Amino acid sequence: MTDYDVIVVGGGPAGSMAAHAAASKGLKTIMLEKDRDIGYPVRCGEAVSDEGLRQFMEPRPEWIAATISKIRMRSPNNTEIDFRSPGSGYILHRRIFDYALANRASQAGVEIQTRAYVDGLIIEDDVVCGVHYQYMGEPRSLRAKLVIAADGVESRVGRMAGIRSAIKLRDIESGYQVTVGNIDIDQEMIDFYVGSNWAPGGYLWVFPKGDRMANIGLGVNGTLSKDYNSHDLIHNFLKEQYPQATVLTSVCGGVPIAQTLKRITGNGIMLTGDAARMVNPVSGGGIVSGMHAGKIAGEVSAEALAAGDVSIKGLEEYPKRWRKAGGKNHEALHRISETIYDISDEQLDRIALRLSKTKEQDRTLLKIFTTVAREKPRILLDVTRAFAGL
Amino acid sequence: MILIKENRCDFCGTCVAVCPVDAIELREADISIIHETCIDCDICIWVCPIDVLSSDNKPEDKND
Ligand SMILES: Cc1cc2nc3c(=O)[nH]c(=O)nc-3n(C[C@H](O)[C@H](O)[C@H](O)COP(=O)(O)OP(=O)(O)OC[C@H]3O[C@@H](n4cnc5c(N)ncnc54)[C@H](O)[C@@H]3O)c2cc1C
Ligand code: SF4
Ligand code: SF4
């Protein structure tokens, strides 16, 4: 006997999209979230592109804190390069956005339980058949035909199923972000700082949040995290650049910039979103890729259950479609990110100087990469591959 | 042994993500180390963005 067709673990964007897709196909679905709130705390810079979001739904004004049309990059010696954003983007209110995605899932028939921490899997004959969890500290179990692990960066559920998802140090950014008030910035511009003085092995971002507020955060690459800590770097930055800003919220968070796991399915289980390591390794963005993969996982659940095969073989459409949808670019992006993080401060300054001499309208993504490639020729092949979608 | 300054933790899961032996449990606002499983590799100490973790084997490496 099963209690549900599908159990989704984790109520982030990937989980809500997976649960929505499964329930929309008529599957009896429950989503378990360990925190008391869906969408809170917000461990995210909250940036998404209009194009990315629009694949799934019409952006709603109440989700949007700021609309972005400009990008600024600053090299270590503070050379500023402005780019026009190729399309518009948003800084979301993820607290509202994640709620809306979960609400949308619930309206498609998904049951949701918060304060439900999954701490074990029911595994029989090498097939995942349900979860053990604690609801407000009380042990419970539920059986299901399929489990979708959308449990974010921690990705413990996958490990419970024997999928090796621990991240290598070089593949994680140890992040810290503050939301500040009383700051005067261009509310249509996102601003990035690169170089070892601001953000060793990563970048620092200033994202407008509307009403003279901003998200300011950074990630320190795991390999450098023994010597640098993102909390201290952010506070130094605030002191030097925006001493008048007041901190309204602060959060920690890890950004997995790893390649997608080689195995994202097991018998009776699929991993999706951050749990499957689907963040874009160059930008650190994982909202849209998580939504996309979650949706595919939910759709594949329905097909696998209709065919009565939840084995790895029966779920093989999931990794296949994810690769087609963007996963195939992922490996090239991962190599690009390793090259980018390897660029020295002097090289960054030279790249910035070269770009600053070009006309703003000529500063396309390709132009940036070819300029970078003069310093780091091996990046060219990967960029070509990524753009060609190989 | 890994020590936790619990009042300081933000429950973000970065340490959980890198632990090679899955020795960290993290609930809503409750973190604990499974000491029998832990192999004292110390990488959780390094990746924590706010220095919640330390080891009683060696003095803390991080300069605050
Ligand atoms: C500092 C920072 C800045 C970022 N900035 C951006 C950005 O600007 N743009 C962007 O696109 N991406 C950004 N990201 C990445 C983005 O936040 C994630 O990729 C995205 O949230 C992934 O969605 P998800 O649904 O896979 O996981 P999550 O949103 O992390 O959701 C996972 C959920 O699972 C729950 N959970 C975990 N374990 C269990 C369990 N055992 N039982 C029950 N529930 C569990 C968690 O509580 C959580 O709610 C950023 C990340 C960080 C850390
Ligand atoms: S990385 Fe630090 S703040 Fe985050 S959960 Fe671990 S100990 Fe807590
Ligand atoms: S010291 Fe290593 S093994 Fe022990 S909890 Fe930390 S990361 Fe895991």
Image (cartoon, coloured by chain):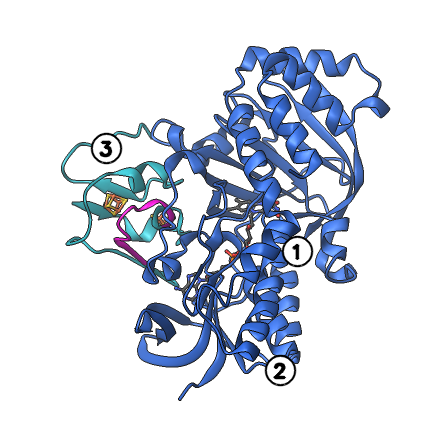
Residue at x-position 55% and y-position 21% = A195
User: Hue of chain A?
Assistant: blue
Secondary structure at badge 1 equals loop
User: To which chain does the residue with label 1 belong?
Assistant: A
Alpha-carbon span between mark 2 and mark 3? 54 Å
Q: Residue at (65%, 35%) from the top-left corner? A: A386
| Amino acid type of the residue tagged 1 in the rendering | His
Return the residue at label 1: A93
Q: Do labels 1 and 2 share a chain?
A: yes
How packed is label 2: few (under 14 Cα within 10 Å), some, or many (20 or more)? few
Q: Circle 3 marks a residue in which chain?
A: B
Q: Which residue is drawn at 52% across and 66% down?
A: A11
Determine whether label 1 and label 3 are within 8 Å by CB: no
**Letter of the chain that mark 2 sits on in the rendering:** A
Q: Which amino acid does label 3 sit on?
A: Glu
| x then y, percent, for residue A145 | 45, 78
Query: Is residue A111 visible to the viewer in this orientation of the structure?
Result: no
Against A341, is A345 above or below? above
- Residue A56 is left or right of residue A259, and the answer is right
In the drawing, what numbered circle is on residue A307?
none
| Residue A173 to residue A74: above or below | below
Dot 1 and dot 3 within a common chain: no
State the cyan chain: B
Percent across and percent down for residue A18 are 58, 67
Hey, what amino acid is under mark 2? Gly
Magenta region includes residue A115: no
Q: Which residue is disc 3 drawn over? A: B60
Query: Sequence-wise, which precedes: disc 1 or disc 2?
Result: 2
* Residue at the spot of label 2: A26
Q: What stretch is highlighted in magenta?
A: B17-25
